[in-house]
Image: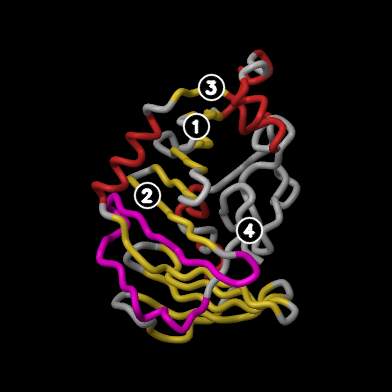
């Protein structure tokens, strides 16, 4: 399976490949942009990927939770968990991630965790959009079908078949650079708490709720494998 598949906490979503040709992005990976994925199957919903230079975020518009990575200092990435409904943020710095034994690669975060996967699959020709390519193959007991956008360095479609179950991510719409910039700016204005300070603020009703729900402290990190199961620390690397 790929090293990780990034999904928001409590979210594992899938979809159908038949509509792969319905949407073709016009942005490039050098521009701020967003891609919205429609996912259906065992669990259903939308997932937005937002990218602006060295920043990449995954946002679940249904519950308002986002996972926001900042690689402007590539060797010292920062991570923020955003809660839009409460207008709050929890910021994790490099030392926090090291303490939690969380190690991520920028290329995997930016590519929906399919950058390394492509190297394990066989090219199958051009995809349905300009500058797109199909890949297919078996890897670690699972069958993968990938339509990859060279323009965005992202999957347009990713299908994983495992023991009679098909799981799929399908790009369906593009968000403009202005939309992405406005969203990131809005999150930046939310009230923030450093992860390292949570222990001193457990009487904060919001933080107490997040601890009880498993978002912080004793929770897993928001990195999930292709089965929607949390990848704990560095044990899967």
Q: Secondary structure at mark 2?
A: strand
Q: Residue at x 63, y 58 (%)?
A: 3
Looking at the image, tell me whether mark 3 or mark 4 is earlier in sequence order.
4
Q: Secondary structure at mark 4?
A: loop
Within 10 angstroms of label 4, few (less than 14), some, or many (20 or more) residues? Answer: many
Residue receiving disc 3: 193
- 30 w.r.t. 149: above or below: above
Within 10 angstroms of label 1, few (less than 14), some, or many (20 or more) residues? Answer: few
Q: Secondary structure at mark 3?
A: strand
Residue 50 on image: x %, y %? 39, 50
Instruction: Locate residue 225 relative to residue 123 in the image: left or right.
Output: right
Q: Residue at x 72, y 46 (%)?
A: 232
Residue receiving disc 4: 3
Query: What's the CA distance linking mark 1 and mark 3?
Result: 13 Å
Residue receiving disc 2: 51
* Between 139 and 24, the one nearer to me in the picture: 24
Looking at the image, tell me whether mark 2 or mark 4 is earlier in sequence order.
4
Q: How many marks?
A: 4
Residue 189 on image: x %, y %? 37, 27
Query: What's the CA distance linking mark 1 and mark 2?
Result: 23 Å
Looking at the image, tell me whether mark 1 or mark 4 is earlier in sequence order.
4
Instruction: Locate residue 55 relative to residue 32 in the image: left or right.
Output: right
Numbered disc in front, either 2 or 4: 2
Looking at the rendering, which quadrant does residue 1 occupy? bottom right
Which mark is on residue 191? none
Give the residues in magenta: 16-43
Residue receiving disc 1: 86
Query: What's the CA distance linking mark 1 and mark 4?
Result: 32 Å
Query: What's the CA distance linking mark 2 and mark 4?
Result: 20 Å
Asked whether residue 119 appears in the rendered view, the answer is no
């Amino acid at each position: 399976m790929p090293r990780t598949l990034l999904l928001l906490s409590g979210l594992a979503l899938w979809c159908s490949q038949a509509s792969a040709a319905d949407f073709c992005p016009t942005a490039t990976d050098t521009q701020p942009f967003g891609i919205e994925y429609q996912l259906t199957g065992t669990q259903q919903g939308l997932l937005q990927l937002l990218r602006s230079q060295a920043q990449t975020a995954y946002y679940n518009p249904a519950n308002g939770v986002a996972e926001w990575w900042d690689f402007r200092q590539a060797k010292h990435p920062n991570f923020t968990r955003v809660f839009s409904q409460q207008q709050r943020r929890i910021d994790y710095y490099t030392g926090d991630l090291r303490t939690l034994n969380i190690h991520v690669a920028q290329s995997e975060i930016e590519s929906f965790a399919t950058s390394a996967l492509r190297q394990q699959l066989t090219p199958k020709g051009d995809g349905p959009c300009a500058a797109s390519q199909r890949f297919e193959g078996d890897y670690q007991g699972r069958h993968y079908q990938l339509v990859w956008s060279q323009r965005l360095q992202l999957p347009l479609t990713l299908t994983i078949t495992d023991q009679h179950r098909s799981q799929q991510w399908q790009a369906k719409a593009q968000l403009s650079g202005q939309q992405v910039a406005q969203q990131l700016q809005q999150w930046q204005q939310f009230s923030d708490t450093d992860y390292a300070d949570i222990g001193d603020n457990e009487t904060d009703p919001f933080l107490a709720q997040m601890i009880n729900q498993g978002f912080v402290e004793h929770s897993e990190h928001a990195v999930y494998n292709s089965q929607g199961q949390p990848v704990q620390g560095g044990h899967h690397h």
